[in-house]
Image (spheres, rainbow, N blue to C red):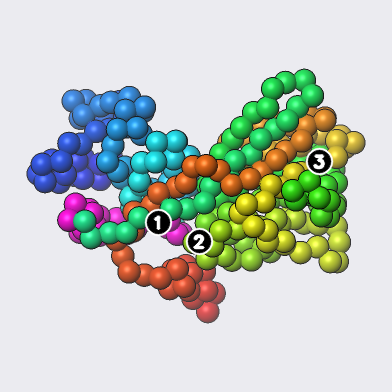
Amino acid sequence: MNMVSSLAAFLLEKDCRVVLTYKIAELTGLKELGVTKYELYSKSDFIIVLGGDGTLLDTGRKAAKYGTPLLGINMGTMGFLASADAADVNETIEKVLNGEYKLEKRLMLEAEISSEADSPKQYVAVNDVCISRGVFTKITDYGIYVNDEYLANFRADGIIISTPTGSTAYNLSAGGPVLKPDIECMVITPICAHSLHSRSIVVSADDVIRIEAGFDTNGDVIMSMDGQTSVILNSGDTISVKKSDRSLNIIKTNRRSFYEILRKKLISKGE
């Protein structure tokens, strides 16, 4: 919390109006800066996110509804989405206040569950939507349709539908391709498929992907968004995934290219 306090003091010196959620304001002893989460997400010019990619993803899903830009300060390990590391936070904020930044719009996903017993429910994701078996569930069949046309059937532990932003996350670990973040597409990647020929499939961002999971197993089938929120699916449920009308707006102040970040974060470490 020392970082929050020092950052608030720095911004106040710059004649900025600083707000924190009530919980953070109380923990830092800055109760006078406390506002509701709605006020924070809907009325801020931009939101500073201290943490790793997971923290930024969680904040991003909430802020995307209002189009509020995020400035990520990496305090984790990967930091693909962050604009700078903690050591450079003041310099980074100075650049933003001076207009020395660019705004990246990242594609997001909307997943809809259609149920025989209930009205459709929608969820949003920044990185990926994952349909997978529960801990004690056997391997499951997943039928994949694109624009209502049958594409493939995977007998696997699960299926990942990833954005280009999420291609370096779970998709990468499951053997999927790395995609440049500004490409308008989605990638379908099976998880531990029981096949010698299962490969990822890249489709257009304008396509609609439908997944029909087999429920003849003993256990649960789960849909998760960014690996942070999840729901248990019921027999007869159909999942549709498409490009969301919302986008994640990320503030970037550094000139590092995606390929430089990729080399430093994922490639050079293994050399």
Which residue is nearer to you in this view: 238 or 2?
Answer: 238
Query: Is 115 left, or right, of 230 in this rendering?
Result: right
Give amino acid for label 1. Answer: Glu
On the question of residue 199 being in view, the answer is yes
Locate residue 67, reporting x and y percent. 39, 41
User: Residue 222's image quarter?
Assistant: top right
Q: Earlier in the sequence, mark 2 or mark 1?
A: 1
Foreground of the two, 56 or 238: 238
Q: Which residue is mark 3?
A: 213
Identify the residue position indicated by label 1 in the image: 104
- Which amino acid type is marked by label 3? Ala
Tell me the distance, in whole angstroms, between the alpha carbons under discs 2 and 1: 9 Å
The earlier-in-sequence mark between 2 and 3 is: 2
Q: Is residue 139 above or below residue 192?
A: above
Residue shown at the point (40%, 36%) measured from the top left:
66
Q: Find residue 58 and report its horizontal and vertical position in percent.
A: 47, 40
Q: Quadrant of residue 15?
A: top left
Residue bearing mark 2? 181
Question: Which of label 2 and label 3 is nearer to you?
Answer: 2
- Hey, what amino acid is under mark 2? Pro
Comes first in the chain, label 1 or label 3 = 1
The Cα atoms of the two marked residues, 1 and 3, are separated by 34 Å
Q: Secondary structure at mark 2?
A: loop
43 or 83: nearer the viewer: 43
Q: Is residue 52 magenta?
A: no
Q: Is residue 169 left or right of residue 176?
A: left
What range of the chain is rendered magenta?
A: 78-98
